[in-house]
Image: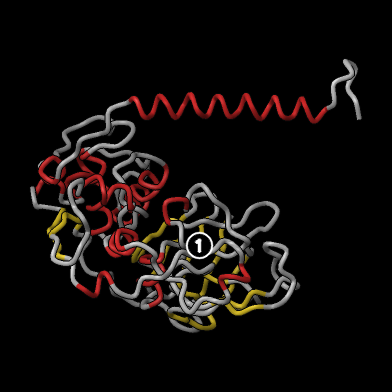
Amino acid sequence: MVNPLGVPNVVNELMKEFCKMRTLISGLAIMLAAPALAMTADDINTAQYTDGAIPNGQSAITVKLQVLLDQAGISPGVIDGYSGGMSESALRGFEAREGLEVDGVLDPEVWAALGGSNGGAILQSYTLTQEDLSNLSAEIPDNVAEKAKMEMLGFTRVTEALAERFHMDEDFLKLLNPDAAFAEGDTITVTDTGPDLEGAGARIEIRKSEQRAVVFDAEGNMLTNYPVAIGSKETPSPEGSLEVTAVAIDPTYSYRPSVNFEADGVKEELTLPPGPNGPVGSVWIDLSKPTYGLHGTSAPAKLFSASSHGCVRFTNWDVKELAHMVSKGVVVDFVE
C-alpha cells in the first residue's frame, strides 16, 4: 500500500524506528553522563530514618528498609536500594501483620517495629569458596529446543549465583563491591537477610491487585507475604479456591505447546532440565487446576513489571522458603 504522498508505508515505519532509536540513544547518553551513585557498606549500616518520605531512586535507607523487611519475614523481593511498588507492597504486608495502619508508607512507628532504631548491621562479609565458582552453566540459549539439550539451566556467572543467594540485585552486588574480582578467597560485602522463615502454612491468598501472596497459619495469623507476578488479561491466573497437590524442588519442565503455549516456533514436546534459570525456576508447587502452579523465576528484578502465562511467579528464594511451609492439601485462594 502507498500513502497519499506516494511514499511507501515501510519508509514511514523505518523513520519511526529511527526516531525511537535516536531518543533511546539520547537517553542512554544522559545516563552515562550522570555520575554513578556512590554507596558503601558503612553508608548502609549507619543509615537512619527519622521522619518523612524515603528518597526517590536508590538510597542507603531503602537498602536498609528492604533488608529489615526481609529479616522480619516479609519479602521485599529483590534487594536493590530502589524505592518503588515492590517495597511499598512489602511495607503494607508488614503493617497488616503487625496491626499497624496499612498505608505502605514508612513512618517512625513502622521503623521502630522493624527494629531500625536498634543500630544493628544489616550487611555482612562473605568469603568466596571453590564451591561458589563451580557448577556454573554455559551461556543459556534463547531457543527452547536448544535449552532442552542442556544438562542444567543453572547460573552462568558467580555474581548471578551470589546475588540470588543473598536476595540481591546483581548490579547492586557489584555496586557494593566495585573492586572485587569475585574469585576464590575474595571477601565481599553482602546483605544479611537472616534464616529462612519456618512455620506451617494452612492457606495462601494470591491477591491479584496487590501482586502479593499471603501465607496464613491454621489459626488465620499471617506468617509471611511475598511479591508475585500473575497472569495477564490474555493469559489470566485462576479464580476461586484451589489446593496444593505436590511440591517439587529443582523440577524439570515439560514443554507442551499443544497444551500450554508455543515458543520459538517449536511444536514438538520437550523436557527442559532443572535449574534456577529454567522456565519455572528452582521450585514448582503444583495446584489442583491442571498446568497451573506456584513457581520461581530466572528474572527476579522483573517480578512487578512482567506477567506470567497464568501461573504465579515468585523469586526463587521466596518460593523455596514457601515450599518448606506448605504440603499437599493447603488451600490457595485467588482473590480479585
Depth order, front residue of 78/76: 78
Q: Residues within 10 Å of mark 1 (few under 14, many from 20)?
A: many
Q: Is residue 146 left or right of residue 3?
A: left
Above or below 334: residue 115: above
Mark 1 lies on a secondary structure that is: strand
Looking at this view, is 305 or 205 the one in front? Answer: 305
At horizontal 26% and vertical 49% (from top left) the residue drawn is 174
With 40 as the anchor, is 170 left or right in this view? right
Up-down relation of residue 331 to residue 1 (above or below): below
Q: Residue at x 16, y 56 (%)?
A: 188
Which residue is labeled 1 in the image? 313
**Residue 183 placed where, x, y %?**
20, 62
Q: Amino acid at mark 1?
A: Arg
Front residue of this view, candidates 64 and 156 = 156
| Left or right, residue 311 beside residue 260 | left
Q: Would residue 163 be found to the left or right of residue 182 on screen?
A: right
The image quadrant where one finds the N terminus is: top right
* Image: 159 above or below 199: above
Provide residue 98's location: percent of width, then percent of height.
28, 54
Q: Quadrant of residue 286?
A: bottom right
Kindly identify the residue that appears in the image at 85 percent across and 26 percent down. 8
Colouring style: secondary structure
